[in-house]
Image (cartoon, grey):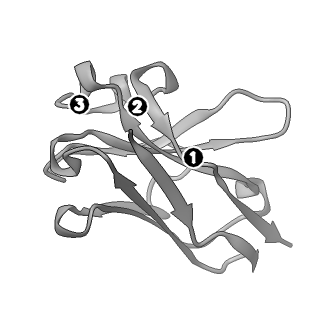
C-alpha cells in the first residue's frame, strides 16, 4: 500500500520562504512522476508543480513560476517544494501525490493534473500573512 506524507507547512510572513517535504513508501519511488498540488477553500485541487521520475523534467503553474522550485531525492524517497517570495494568495492546503501506475513514466504540464494522480498525502497547511 502506498503511503504519502507531507511536512513543512506553517505560518509565514509575506516575502518569506518555506520548504515542503514529502516522503512516499510502498512503491518504487524512482519510477514515479510526482506532483505538488494546492487547494483553496471551495475550489478544486490544482497542480502547481510536477517532476518526472528522474527529475529531469519539471513543470510549474504560471502563478508559482520563478518563486517555487520542485526537486526530488530518489535515494531518500523524498519530494521537495521550495517556496520563495510567498504571497498571501499562496495560502492554501498543499498536497503531494504520486502518479497513478499507468502514468508513472509520464511527465510535463499536461499530466500535472489531479486525475492522473492516485496516492495522496493528508496535506499540509501553508498560511502567508500580509
Front-lying residue, 22 or 38: 22
Find numbered disc 2 in the image and state the secondary structure of the residue it sits on.
loop
Q: Can residue 43 be seen in this snapshot?
A: yes
Q: Which residue is mark 3?
A: 104
Front-lying residue, 73 or 50: 73
Q: Which residue is mark 2?
A: 112
Residue furthest to the front in view is 1
Task: Please state if 75 lies on the left or on the right of 76 as rendered.
Answer: left
* Residue appearing at x 58%, y 72% in the figure: 8
Q: Earlier in the sequence, mark 3 or mark 2?
A: 3
The answer to the question of whether label 3 and label 2 lie on touching residues, with beta carbons closer than 8 A, is no
Residue 126 position within the rendered picture, expressed as x and y whole percent measured from the top left: 71, 63
* C-alpha distance separating marks 1 and 2: 14 Å
* Residue 38 drawn above or below residue 8: above
* Residue appearing at x 25%, y 69% in the figure: 76
Label 1 or label 3, whichever lies nearer to me, is 3
Front-lying residue, 92 or 15: 92
Q: Quadrant of the C terminus?
A: bottom right
* C-alpha distance separating marks 3 and 2: 12 Å
Label 3 or label 2, whichever lies nearer to me, is 3
* Displayed quadrant of residue 100: top left
Find numbered disc 3 in the image and state the secondary structure of the residue it sits on.
loop
* Residue appearing at x 70%, y 56% in the figure: 90
Q: Earlier in the sequence, mark 1 or mark 3?
A: 1
Q: Which residue is mark 1?
A: 63
* C-alpha distance separating marks 1 and 3: 25 Å
* Residue appearing at x 16%, y 31% in the figure: 105
Find numbered disc 1 in the image and state the secondary structure of the residue it sits on.
loop
Q: Quadrant of the N terminus?
A: top left
Amino acid at each position: 500500500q502506498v503511503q504519502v506524507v507531507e511536512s513543512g507547512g506553517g505560518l509565514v510572513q509575506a516575502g518569506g520562504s518555506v520548504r515542503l517535504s514529502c516522503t512516499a513508501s510502498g512503491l518504487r519511488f524512482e519510477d514515479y512522476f510526482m506532483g505538488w498540488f494546492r487547494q483553496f477553500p471551495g475550489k478544486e485541487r490544482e497542480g502547481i508543480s510536477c517532476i518526472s521520475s528522474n527529475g529531469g523534467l519539471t513543470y510549474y503553474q504560471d502563478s508559482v513560476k520563478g518563486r517555487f522550485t520542485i526537486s526530488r531525492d530518489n535515494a531518500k524517497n523524498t519530494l521537495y517544494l521550495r517556496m520563495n517570495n510567498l504571497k498571501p494568495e499562496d495560502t492554501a492546503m498543499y498536497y503531494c501525490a504520486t502518479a497513478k501506475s499507468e502514468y508513472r513514466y509520464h511527465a510535463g504540464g499536461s499530466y500535472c493534473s489531479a486525475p492522473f494522480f492516485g496516492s495522496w498525502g493528508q496535506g499540509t497547511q501553508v498560511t502567508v500573512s500580509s
